[in-house]
Image (cartoon, rainbow, N blue to C red):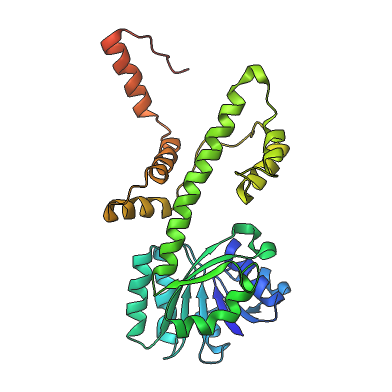
Amino acid sequence: MELAIVGLGRMGGNMARRLVQRGHRVVGYSRTKATVDEHVPFGIVPAYTPEEVVNALTPPRVVWFMYPAGEPTETAIFQFAPLLQQGDIVVNGANSYYKDSIRYAERLAVRGIHFADVGVSGGVWGLENGYGLMVGGDPAIVAQLEPLLRDLAPAPDKGWVHVGPVGAGHYAKMIHNGIEYAIMQAYAEGFELLKRKTEFQIDIAAVAEAWRYGTVIRSWLLDLIAGFLKEDPELHGIAPYVADSGEGRWTAHEAIDLGSPAPLITLALHERFRSQDERGFQYRFLAQLRRAFGGHAVKKLEP
């Protein structure tokens, strides 16, 4: 097949390279000329304007967007929309809120442009290992995209799924990321308990490596943990700040809307919020309140 990938960042660029390696013709576009040029040696057909992207493809076109979710993706899609024709397909591969993807599809349908939303998992390892893909869209449109999905996935028949209509792909990816929050939090808490038991002098890197085999908690995340702990078990130079991309928040909101308990995912999200509070006001507040009612000592900040 041929397609354009709009947005050649860490994910989009590697996806383009993987598709080229498997024989597809990929037109690459990004917001800067330098980013496009970086990918030319990997076989990407360069395009430096939206018009060049559209003109480089034979109708019906497939234009796959890999910009950050929210305003960057929405702006890009509707910058291209007037240049596309009836029957063309827009694929949104960003970590978009599923309701945004439904809205994009409705706006594009007025122009006769088809839409699919694809939740993409795999990070920087996807080029080598393949990507997990959760697809939302009309079955006929997904069928047209299937050669791309099969080659992006870890295997043609594994790692990708047509979840349902438009919006379902990003809904599944949202829940995927919410689960990811909780799993990551559990690993972090467990390894801190191992590290704090100082009288045992536990080699947490060795434990992580051993747990990779035969245990019920082995996983790809544990493989990554073992790798970075082997390099630096003290995690020198890493600030205790954990960002949240938005998908955890959306998952928590969805749990409330559906009345479906999701305490672990929600708590993992709140722990990320806690790490982002550089002022630590809640903890200073609690310390002062303990002193107020019980006369407990408080620890003063270093000047």
Percent x, y of residue 168 = 40, 69
Q: Is residue 37 visible?
A: no
Q: Looking at the image, which residue is at 39% across and 77% down?
A: 78
Q: Nearer the viewer, residue 74 or 262?
A: 262
Q: Is residue 259 visible?
A: yes
Above or below — where is 114 with respect to 204? Answer: below
Q: Would you say 280 lies left or right of 122 here?
A: left
Q: Quadrant of residue 258?
A: bottom left
Above or below — where is 138 with respect to 181? Answer: below
Q: Dividing the image into 4 quarters, which one contains the N terminus?
A: bottom right
Q: Would you say 242 lies left or right of 232 here?
A: left
Q: Quadrant of residue 53?
A: bottom right
Please identify the residue farthest to the top as the structure is shown: 295
Percent x, y of residue 220 = 63, 51
Q: Nearer the viewer, residue 63 or 145?
A: 145
Q: Quadrant of residue 83?
A: bottom left
Q: Looking at the image, which residue is at 42% across and 14% down?
A: 299
Percent x, y of residue 169 = 44, 68
